[in-house]
């Protein structure tokens, strides 16, 4: 809008071309970066030149408790190995307390031999008329090539119908026998007129 300086008349007047250039149109914003993010890094690359951009990967989460899990597995393996070694070392005692365990040892070639396989038992009986007592005498011999534990010995007396009329167990004077060694024993009982037969053998682990 312009106005005359003399008469104060106003009107609209277009400007000459090129006097007032239009402002440039705004540029479109750059596209948003996609994952993984690319950030500008002003650092030399392997060739000694300045790199324009590097890829920044997301940090991996730290595995908490992994060391404790590994330690737990190692401890468990040590306990199992120690238990297996103890079971082999004291297998005689294990079988004595739990005879069925000998089947498990047998599957791996570590079966505990039966007393009759490594020990020979010889016994005789007589009647002491003066004391009216039954006297049983004998010996146990280690016929193996290693030290053996001598179990308790049991005696059973039966009548004419093979019915047990008396029985008992006892220990010999030596618990362990060297290879080829012998230990003698003697046991007595009041005479039982009903007894007609006698059996002497090694007692089982569960027999008192």
Image (cartoon, rainbow, N blue to C red):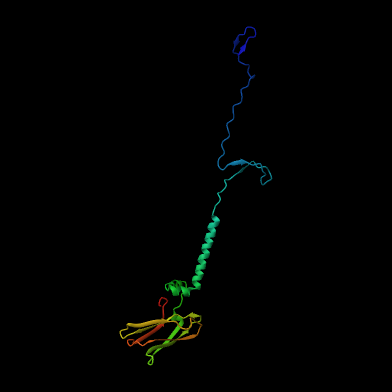
Closer to the camera in the image, 84 or 182: 182
The relative height of residue 128 versus residue 37 in the rendered view (above or below) is: below
**Direction from residue 12 to residue 118 in the image, left or right:** left
Query: As drawn, which residue projects farthest toward the bottom?
Result: 130
**Within the image, what quadrant is residue 196 found in?**
bottom left
> Whole-percent x and y of residue 201?
41, 82
> Whole-percent x and y of residue 190?
37, 87
**Quadrant into which the C terminus falls:** bottom left
Residue 200 visible here = yes
Name the residue located 54 percent from the left edge and 55 percent from the top edge: 66
What count of labels does the image hold? 0
**Direction from residue 54 to residue 118 in the image, left or right:** left
Residue 110 visible here = no
Query: As drawn, which residue projects farthest toward the right?
Result: 48
> Whole-percent x and y of residue 13?
60, 13
The relative height of residue 107 versus residue 73 in the rendered view (above or below) is: below
Name the residue located 55 percent from the left edge and 56 percent from the top edge: 67
Name the residue located 54 percent from the left edge and 59 percent from the top edge: 71
Query: As drawn, which residue projects farthest toward the top?
Result: 7
Query: As drawn, which residue projects farthest toward the front?
Result: 131
Name the residue located 48 percent from the left edge and 73 percent from the top edge: 91
**Direction from residue 4 to residue 196 in the image, left or right:** left
**Quadrant into which the N terminus falls:** top right
Closer to the camera in the image, 99 or 111: 99
The relative height of residue 96 versus residue 77 in the rendered view (above or below) is: below
> Whole-percent x and y of residue 73?
52, 60
The relative height of residue 32 versus residue 99 in the rendered view (above or below) is: above
């Amino acid at each position: 809008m312009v106005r005359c300086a003399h008469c104060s008349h106003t009107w609209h007047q277009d400007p000459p071309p090129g006097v007032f250039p239009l402002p440039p149109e705004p540029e479109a914003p750059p596209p948003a970066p996609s994952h993984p993010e690319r950030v500008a890094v002003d650092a030399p690359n392997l060739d000694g030149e300045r790199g324009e951009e590097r890829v920044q990967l997301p940090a991996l989460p730290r595995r908490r408790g992994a060391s404790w899990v590994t330690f737990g597995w190692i401890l468990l393996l040590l306990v199992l190995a120690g238990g297996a070694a103890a079971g082999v070392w004291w297998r005689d005692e294990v079988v004595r307390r739990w005879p069925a365990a000998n089947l498990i040892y047998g599957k791996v070639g570590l079966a505990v031999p039966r007393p009759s396989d490594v020990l020979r038992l010889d016994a005789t009986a007589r009647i002491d008329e003066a004391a009216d007592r039954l006297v049983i005498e004998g010996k146990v011999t280690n016929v193996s090539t290693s030290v053996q534990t001598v179990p308790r010995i049991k005696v059973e007396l039966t009548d004419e119908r093979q019915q047990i009329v008396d029985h008992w167990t006892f220990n010999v004077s030596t618990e362990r026998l060297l290879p080829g060694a012998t230990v003698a024993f003697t046991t007595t009982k009041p005479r039982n007129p009903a007894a007609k037969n006698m059996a002497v053998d090694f007692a089982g682990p569960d027999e008192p």
